[in-house]
Image (spheres, rainbow, N blue to C red):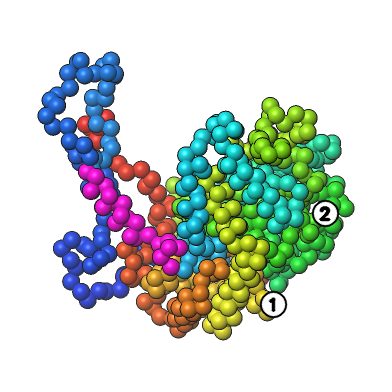
Amino acid sequence: MSINQSGWRPTTPTKGNDAAPTFTGNKALMLEEALIFKIGDATTTGVDFTGFGAPTAADDKLSGLARTAPIGLPGLSEPETVRHYTRLSRQNYAIDLGLFPLGSCTMKHNPRLNEKMARLPGFSDIHPLAPVDTVQGALEVIHQLAHWLVTLTGMTSVAMSPKAGAHGELCGILAIKAALAKRGEGARKVILVPESAHGTNPATAAFAGFAVEDIPATPDGRIDTAALIARLGPDVAGVMITNPNTCGLFECDLKTISDAVHAAGGYVYCDGANFNAIVGRVRPGDLGVDAMHINLHKTFSTPHGGGGPGSGPVVFSEALTPFAPLPFVEKQGEHFVLIEEETAGEHHADSFGRMVAFHGQMGMFTRALTYILSHGADGLRQVAEDAVLNANYVLRSLEDVLHAPFAGAGPCMHEALFSDSNLADGFSTLDVAKGLIDEGYHPMTVYFPLVVHGAMLVEPTETESKAALDQFIGALRSVAERAKAGDASLKTAPHFAPRSRLDETQAARKPILVWKEPAPIAQAAE
Amino acid sequence: MRYFTEDHEWIDVEGAIGTVGISNYAQSQLGDIVFVDVPADGRELAKGDEAAVVESVKAASDVYSPVSGAVIEGNPALADSPDLVNSDAEGEGWFFRITLSDEGELDSLMEEAAYEAFVAKL
């Protein structure tokens, strides 16, 4: 169970501010901004129709079906609209503003070269139904990217279409399901998921119709290999293992586990969300993995984090390749063709179907291929090395002030994991996270993974320089020392953000999801 | 008679009817509870089955049935007032009532003193 011992309540008084409040509510360049419905006026639009007179019956091209009552949309002029969203964007935090330590998310810099390539009209202005002869370049990008993903992972094939990590998981598990059905072993209904796996793994298995059974973690944060192997049997369809796992550790026994799972007739799904830590260094195919998704939006940059779309191609072993979903791109002579239901023929008769209507996220493909080609084999290897080095630098720089539960187990991979167990009584991970906002950082991932009490998961990625890491470490050290000393001001942090501590409890218990017009206007709006 | 599980559920037993909730220690660890999903009337539960879901501001957790039996009713008050679990976990914040199918299962549970000793070690 996760813990909230912070003691904070909405009624807790906030820290007094000596300065007089401003007339506008703005604090210098920190601008207050109302809801768009409150600043808008239905009579204001971006276009001025004055002089055209009231519409007549002859103007009505909708045969009397034109709307007669307001529909409750805000009306703003163009500059009002631009300012509204620009002001809101200033209250946001982004990787383009600073270090984004959100563990498990790989918030790395998205090189601008990616953007330049993705915006080439031949990639950005095409339609998924365009004749294949007119989009050969785009198909070549998909084909080349597929080649490099298969090469980097040591697998046999790749399904490019899944749209994100969890979608990729589903794709892999459906392929396992199809393979078991083909073998006449549909009775295998259990998927084993270790505690160190991503939270989406058990959800995926359950969604695909399997029963999920937990496998415990060892005290050093890895899979209990003996417990997993002991559970294997004729009812087990497979395992889902996150490697490196959510504790930021490499699952050293994966090959042993894979061999045992295969011997017992099951398949191995690997959650490749943390592939960034091992790309160019480890090929999951060599570890006996049968299917693994790759988050292009993590390992191979591309914008994400409330921004761009995700993309989660799934690589398959030889055993699962016949069951991979359609469509995919194939090179026939010098020509790239799209293999779909009509063209697949008997070669792909066992394909389990489709994950999406079309080919996948073209924009992400272009960015990921740009990232791969611009880094090269040596560059990708250095990505993994630097990501791991940076995480270990954070871990070793802070383990004297924050409790690091697995620091004794050796180096971490791409992320450093701390717990709240040595903070002062009444202080928790939440207070450290809120204090970090005042220091100008997005907080790290908190209270995940669940196997660690009050977890704080920091993933610096290879993007950050030593200077940037040192500043972040200094900030987190300062906040942690305040939490250990029982600094009461931390209980009401953040103090310098546009909003101080929010009433998350009330927001969850009584969420207001839709803006409602004030009563008098509501009558007119019907 | 009140019994506890190692997963922090409690059960009050009167005759063959049990009332189940989560312990005061559990609610204090979960923090502010924002949503509770209780089992439907008549649902057959085996001991250890996932019977209810409790969500706090930070996490969703499963609540396991401490005994086997048929659910008589879920606590209707929790739909609108999940905070009852915070304010009175071992009273008004009960989750569901169940007809025990095997009272012998109670032997594997802890009595209050044993549970307090168990929690003290966590």
The answer for which chain carries disc 1 is: A
Query: Which quarter of the image is occupied by the C terminus of chain A?
Result: top left
**Circles 2 and 1: CB atoms closer than 8 Å:** no
Q: Which structural element holds mark 1?
A: loop
Front residue of B87/A510: it is A510
Viewer can see residue A88: yes
The answer for which chain carries disc 2 is: A
Which percent across, then down, holds residue A300? 58, 57
Looking at the rendered structure, the kind of residue marked 2 is Val
Viewer can see residue B12: no
Q: Residue furthest right?
A: A263
Task: Tell me what residue is drawn at x 19 percent, y 39 percent.
Answer: A44
Q: Is residue A302 above or below residue A436?
A: above
Q: Is residue A103 above or below residue A485?
A: above
Which percent across, then down, holds residue B35? 49, 51
Task: Tell me what residue is drawn at x 57 percent, y 57 percent.
Answer: A371
Which percent across, then down, holds residue A22? 18, 66
Front residue of A216/A371: it is A371
Task: Tell me what residue is drawn at x 31 percent, y 63 percent.
Answer: A498
Query: Which quarter of the image is occupied by the N terminus of chain A?
Result: bottom right
Q: Is residue B99 above or below residue A127?
A: below
Magenta residues, as a range? Answer: A77-98
Among numbered discs 2 and 1, the one appearing first in the sequence = 2
**Residue labelled with disc 2:** A261
**Residue labelled with disc 1:** A410
Q: Quadrant of residue A43?
A: top left
Instruction: Answer few, some or many: residues within 10 Å of disc 1's Cα (few below 14, many 20 plus, some between 14 and 19).
Output: few
Q: Residue furthest front?
A: A334
Q: Which structural element holds mark 2?
A: helix
Task: Tell me what residue is drawn at x 17 percent, y 36 percent.
Answer: A48
